[in-house]
Image (tube, rainbow, N blue to C red):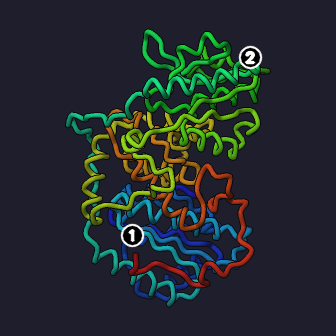
Amino acid sequence: MMQASFNKGSICVFACRWCSLLGAERAGRDRLELPANIRLIPVSCAGSVSADHVVQALTGGAAGVAVLGCHIGGCRHNDANRDAHARLEVLGSLLDAAGIDRRRLLVSWGTAHEAEQYARLMRDFAALLGSLPPPAVPSAACSDTPVKKAPCGPCSEKAEDDALRASAADIVRKGGMVLGLRRTDMGIQPGLFRREEELEALVAGPRIPMAKCAGLLLKDRTLGSVQGMEFRALREEALALAEVPLTAACRECDAAALRQLADLHQFPAELISVLPVPCSMEQKDACGCVRGEERDLPAETGDLEQRAELWKDAFSRCVQCHWCREACPVCVCPSCSLDNAELTPLGAQSTPMGYHLARAMHVADSCVLCGACEQACPRNLPLLKLHAAAARALREQRYAAGTNSISPLLAERRRASSAAVPQWKHNLGGK
């Protein structure tokens, strides 16, 4: 993908060189009427346009973004536009949740190689953008408004601790080891339990994400060494006992995260067993849990303008400490592209909005809605709202993270038929 820049209010057009770019070039040669603010970016395939490119353009000042590619089923690059279609459908839902009108993203799959067809599409898109209210842009400065952290859930009752200890005792008697929460003089911390007498310190505890810790321990076992400083003493102890079967005492969300990590090939699934720690309804309410037959993903609240104001305030508080990313159990890339200015799409530095939208798309099909990101945020940003929006869009594609199903956003996945996507599809004028 080539680097590019654009002026505020421009229309960023990613045009496939095999179809849409031909229409754009012919429209220019024929001197057809076109919007003056088009910033044309040729790409080898529309499937190479990532969500990061769209996010950085919209949060960097572009009035709208158009992704123009070949017919679904007619791609010259191993049907890459199918993946782009699934990816951009999820991104549209994410933009809407963040208060950015999803009509600012135009996705068209068709030939568009004819000059008149391309020019008409661009004129209609420019007219639509001109009719929309200007997007709310969060301030770059951090708000000094005091932030009160939401509770992480009440501590467990004695009966819950006793039940957990009894189950853990059966495991250690059989020669296993339990990863759980240990009550210490310095508070409740993750710990390993191998002997029955140690289990007096084991507690179900408050809501403390365990999947991150368990994932690091298992990755160390897979690699045969400790690669980082986080939980280092605990990880070295676990590595020294690499032959002892490991069981994690964790809640439903952490169990789902561990399944997802195994799906991401971070470690073999058979390396760990799960000792369930049940959550009370009070704890589920405190965490905003969406698991269980009695619950569903929360619907969006308020209209687009209200959501825009919500996120304008939220993103103005963000200090880009990246604690959300550090706490996330499924952020497993060795290095994050959001940290590399040279890899930042369009040569634009990430704003808080750009960072969070891009990160939400990076983990869209891996996020199990455990809430670790929101819990870790020192400024109390409602990050689960973004991730829930992406999860809703993926549910419409019959996918949920942590269920061992195949993600529609994976490049290896190919539908057997193109019947699910019309031969000419664009979202102009609709939501």
Number of numbered discs overlaid on the protein picture: 2
Q: Amino acid at mark 1?
A: Arg
Q: How many angstroms separate mark 1 from mark 2 (CA)? A: 54 Å
Q: Which residue is at the front of the view, 208 or 294?
A: 294
The reply, left or right, for residue 412 in relation to residue 24 is right
Q: Position of residue 341 (x, y in %)?
A: 50, 42
Query: Above or below — where is 314 with respect to 326?
Result: below
Q: Which residue is at the front of the view, 407 or 422?
A: 407
**Quarter assignment of residue 136:** bottom left
Q: What is the secondary structure assignment of the residue under circle 2? A: loop
Q: Which residue is at the front of the view, 194 or 169?
A: 169
Residue 39 visible to an observer of this rendering: no
Residue at 29% over, 59% down? 307
The reply, left or right, for residue 381 in relation to residue 46 is left
Residue at 56% over, 27% down? 164
Numbered badge on residue 266: none
Depth check, mark 1 against mark 2: the one in front is 2
Residue at 54% over, 21% down? 190
Name the residue beneath numbered marker 1.
104
**Quarter assignment of residue 56:** bottom left
1 or 2: tag closer to the N-terminus: 1
Q: Amino acid at mark 2?
A: Leu
Quadrant containing the C terminus is bottom left
Q: Position of residue 424 (x, y in %)?
A: 57, 84
Q: Disc 1, disc 2: CB below 8 Å?
A: no
Query: Above or below — where is 365 with respect to 208?
Result: below
Q: What is the secondary structure assignment of the residue under circle 1? A: helix
Name the residue beneath numbered marker 2.
241
Hey, which residue is sitting farthest left in the picture? Answer: 145
Q: Position of residue 313 (x, y in %)?
A: 25, 48
